[in-house]
Image (cartoon, rainbow, N blue to C red):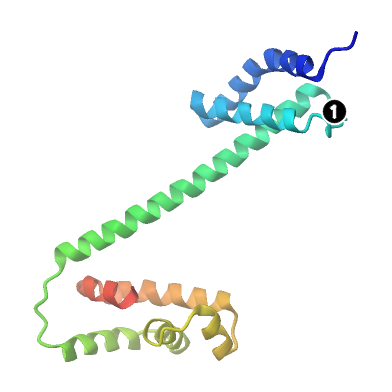
Amino acid sequence: MKDSPQENFERIYKVYYPKMFAFAKQYVGSDADAENIVQDVFLVLWEKRDELEMTTALVTFLFTLVKNHCLKFLRHRVVEEAYSNYVREEWSFKLYALESFDYSYQSEKELRAIIRRALDTLPERCREIFIKSRFEGLKYKEISEALGISVNTVENQMAIALRKLRVALKDYLPLFLFLVS
């Protein structure tokens, strides 16, 4: 008598789960994350049981799935960490700006002159793109169409402008934050 798919699955689970768990844990570090990865692999195996054609040994197939899930998990962690660092840096910047804010400027005219001088330090095309974005309210796609350049070029020029303005207006951080928001 032939075993049912469920019985086969249970046997595979009992034999390979501990090995797959140990393998995943080496790379992801935590028991909970390793367990989730291995459970995901077994879920895929169960859901695709009728479609799978085993052209390689079962152990090779299972560990390849675990490896791929670990890679996906780790790549996601890298993105999360980068975003977390970005947020932390951005909030630190804003906190510093607010703490150092001293509204002792003579007039709005003086503030405009400070901004104008900072803008004048930008390369011409970079300044033009920044003005269209921040002062005229155009979207990057609209700017790219108006100037006959790619959206990617607009994005790169905006990044350059913001970086240079952040340096040029470092003593006027709240002003800079107001300008770029």
Q: Quadrant of residue 69?
A: top right
Nearer the observer, 164 or 33: 33
**Which residue occupies the foreground of this view, 93 or 33?**
33
Image spot of residue 82 (x, y percent):
45, 51
| Extreme residue in the top direction | 1
Amino acid type of the residue tagged 1 in the rendering: Thr
Above or below, 39 against 8 in this view is: below
Q: 66 or 168: which is nearer to us?
A: 66
- If the image is split into quadrants, where does the C terminus sit? bottom left
Q: How many marks?
A: 1
- Left or right position of 138 against 63: left
Horizontal arrangement in the rendering, residue 150 relative to residue 174 (left or right): right
Answer above or below: position of 87 versus 27: below
Q: Which residue is mark 1?
A: 56
For the point 82% across and 16% down, the residue is 4
| Quadrant (top left, top right, bottom left, bottom right) of the N terminus | top right
Rendering quarter of residue 52 = top right
Question: What percent of the width, then of the height, locates residue 137?
Answer: 41, 83
x and y percent of residue 114 in the render? 23, 85
Residue at image location 22% in from the left, 90% down from the top: 113
Looking at the image, residue 166 sits to the left or right of residue 42; the answer is: left
- Where 4 sits versus 165, above or below? above
Q: Is residue 76 left or right of residue 82?
A: right
Residue at 33% across / 53% down in the picture? Answer: 88
Q: Secondary structure at mark 1?
A: loop
- Residue 141 location (% of width, % of height): 55, 80
Circle 1 crowding by C-alpha within 10 Å: few under 14, some 14–19, many from 20: few
